[in-house]
Amino acid sequence: EAKIGGGGVGVARERRRILVMVEPSPFSHVSGMKNRFLRLIENLVELGDDVVVVTPDRNAPATYHGAQVIGVSGLRTGTFQLPFYP
């Protein structure tokens, strides 16, 4: 259980398991969304959640701020496809 809230007053919440699938990769691609995704991952981990990030990046770090990172060269799930990057 994690506590959220500031000033010493917290609300108990259950730890969640969260999968973040993001394209383009915030670890190698510079865009306006890069910082938003990195802060999202950081905040979820700081709240005590178990976070796994899947991104099309062959050189992604193994972990980021305590989150597991899985870099793939391409992924197809039904009609959804992450593109292949060189």
Image (spheres, grey):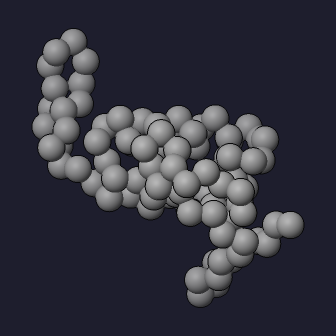
Residue 44: which quarter of the image? top left
Give the camera-side residue of 79 and 68. Answer: 68
The residue that appears at 25% across and 18% down in the rendered structure is: 6
Residue 31: which quarter of the image? top right
Name the side, left or right, on which 16 lies relative to 43. left
Please count the marks in the image. 0
Name the side, left or right, on which 49 lies relative to 56. left
Which quadrant is the C terminus positioned in?
bottom right
Name the side, left or right, on which 61 lies relative to 49. right
Measuring from the top left, give residue 59's x and y in whole percent: 71, 57
Of all residues, the one furthest to the bottom in this rendering is 78
Measuring from the top left, give residue 79's x and y in whole percent: 64, 84
The residue that appears at 38% across and 57% down in the rendered structure is: 18
Of all residues, the one furthest to the top in this rendering is 7
Measuring from the top left, give residue 7's x and y in whole percent: 21, 12
The answer to whether residue 23 is above or below residue 32 is: below
The residue that appears at 66% across and 69% down in the rendered structure is: 72
Give the camera-side residue of 29 and 60. Answer: 60
Measuring from the top left, give residue 73's x and y in whole percent: 72, 71
Of all residues, the one furthest to the right in this rendering is 86
Residue 1: which quarter of the image? top left
The answer to whether residue 2 is above or below residue 7 is: below
The answer to whether residue 55 is above or below residue 30 is: below
The answer to whether residue 33 is above or below residue 82 is: above
The residue that appears at 58% across and 43% down in the rendered structure is: 37
